[in-house]
């Protein structure tokens, strides 16, 4: 086959190689339109000689995505893409984590941590589609998200290069980023007075930075986005019935409800009643503590309801073992190890335990509280006939004496031996 350019018989001639060398390389930027990524997009155009594909992942955050797409192009992006990931986020990431009962350090419902591997997966897929050779993210060198993004990218395509501007540029703070944006005419919403770093999706919103960096400062009411402060919640309780099928939420008040609609409605109910706001100091993977405020209204309701149903249908040993798995699962997700054999193995265990987790839980929402007040299931291990203090045909109270004698035998022997000494 001869080259049309030079007529040689080589498959890849010198002219073709020259074109390949001078062609612009492409980079895929995880783009939100916020302060960091807006500045990064401009900085990339000034610092590197390649085309930037700005990818905005819609995981349920409240944004004007048309404006974000236009802003990316106006700031210098070669191409701007918005991906709707809400349904996939809920069914493939949130529901498995919910079924596992994973809560990091007993407080954090992993809203950001669950979303990062999903986003990284789609950044890798976009890079393949666009022929890009780099993934660029706006995570800081002190945060967890850099680990989550890059671990996922390396698990899915180790050939991709990674650029993390916060680890290499001269900007040292968000104040520097604001100054950079103002100097280069990059439109941003942040100011020096309102400088919270926020991450939102369909599951939660997180708040960090600003006055929260001093743990002695109480967070202010104006920080709330998804939920009302407890003091401003209604004085009347609200009840909602949640249906589960094999551990996954399936309906509200007896009506089958699609995942996105179900979670959105619980976010509304929980938010109105001040449910799901936590103010915590957590241990980051990178070795330091951080302070953040998290709002997870619908997610908090679901965790409480799911736990309540499990108590009705799971036996004691299964629940105990599942609690151990939940702790490991939470750390795994927090650390960004989603695409690992361990997570798949834990999911297999969890899914077996969830075969029986089908039923209905009635939740009471009041002044920040989300309480399971009633539950029912065809797989219930609870029996009113057996639990009653009255006489029944299964349990003979005289049997308890022999059981206690055997159960306490090691303690009895130990006491006798100590007395002899």
Image (cartoon, grey):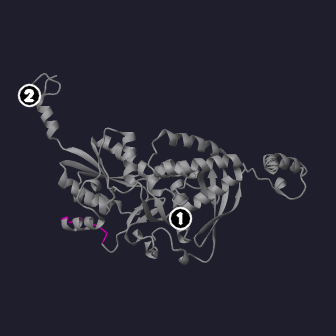
Query: Mark on residue 193?
Result: none
Q: Nearer the viewer, residue 38 or 169?
A: 169
Query: Percent x, y for residue 20?
Result: 17, 36
State whether the magenta stretch is mostly helix, strand or loop.
Answer: loop
Q: Which residues are magenta?
A: 184-191
Q: Which sits in the foreground, 364 or 260? A: 364
Would you say residue 77 is visible in this rendering? yes
Residue at which label 1 appears: 297
Decide if residue 76 is in sight here.
no
Numbered-mark total: 2
Left or right: 324 in relation to 174? right
Q: Which is more N-terminal, label 1 or label 2?
A: 2
Q: Is residue 282 above or below residue 26?
A: below
The secondary element bearing badge 2 is classed as loop
Mark 1 element type: helix
Query: Measuring 69% from the left and 46% from the top, which residue is drawn there?
Result: 317
Q: Nearer the viewer, mark 2 or mark 1?
A: 1
Question: Mark 2 highlights which residue?
Answer: 6
> Is 352 one of the magenta-colored residues?
no
Q: Between residues 195 and 374, which one lies in front from this camera angle?
A: 195
């Amino acid at each position: 086959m001869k080259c049309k350019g030079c007529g040689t018989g080589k498959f890849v001639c010198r002219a073709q190689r020259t074109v390949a060398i001078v062609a612009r390389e492409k980079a895929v930027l995880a783009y939100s339109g916020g302060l960091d990524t807006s500045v990064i997009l401009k900085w990339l155009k000034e610092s590197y000689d390649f085309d930037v594909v700005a990818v905005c992942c819609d995981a349920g955050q409240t944004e004007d995505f048309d404006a974000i797409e236009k802003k990316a192009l106006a700031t210098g992006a070669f191409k701007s893409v918005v991906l709707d990931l809400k349904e996939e986020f809920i069914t493939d990431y949130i529901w498995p984590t919910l079924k596992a009962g994973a809560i990091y350090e007993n407080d954090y419902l992993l809203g950001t941590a669950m979303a990062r591997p999903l986003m990284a997966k789609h950044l890798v897929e976009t890079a393949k589609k666009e022929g890009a050779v780099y993934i660029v993210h706006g995570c800081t060198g002190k945060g967890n998200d850099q680990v989550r993004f890059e671990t996922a990218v390396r698990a899915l395509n180790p050939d991709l290069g990674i650029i993390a501007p916060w680890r290499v540029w001269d900007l040292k703070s968000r104040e520097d980023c604001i100054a950079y944006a103002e100097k280069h005419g990059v439109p941003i919403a942040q100011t020096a007075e309102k400088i919270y770093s926020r991450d939102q999706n369909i599951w939660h919103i997180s708040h960090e930075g600003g006055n929260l960096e001093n743990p002695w400062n109480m967070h202010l009411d104006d920080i709330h986005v998804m939920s009302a402060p407890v003091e401003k919640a209604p004085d009347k309780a609200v009840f909602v019935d949640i249906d589960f099928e094999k551990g996954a939420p399936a309906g509200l008040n007896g009506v089958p409800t699609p995942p996105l609609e179900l979670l959105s409605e619980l976010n509304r109910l929980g938010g109105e009643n001040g449910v799901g706001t936590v103010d915590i100091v957590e241990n980051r993977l990178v070795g330091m503590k951080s302070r953040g405020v998290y709002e997870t209204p619908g997610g908090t309701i679901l965790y409480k309801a799911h736990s309540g149903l499990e108590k009705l249908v799971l036996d004691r040993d299964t629940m105990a073992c599942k609690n151990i798995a939940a702790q490991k699962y939470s750390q795994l997700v927090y650390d960004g190890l989603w695409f690992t054999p361990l997570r798949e193995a834990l999911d297999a265990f969890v899914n077996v335990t969830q075969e029986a987790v089908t039923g209905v839980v009635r939740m009471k929402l009041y002044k920040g509280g989300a309480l399971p007040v009633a539950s029912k299931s065809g797989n219930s291990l609870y029996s009113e006939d057996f639990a009653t203090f009255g006489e029944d045909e299964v349990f003979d109270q005289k049997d308890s004496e022999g059981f206690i004698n055997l159960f306490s035998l090691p303690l009895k022997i130990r006491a006798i031996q100590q007395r002899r000494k």
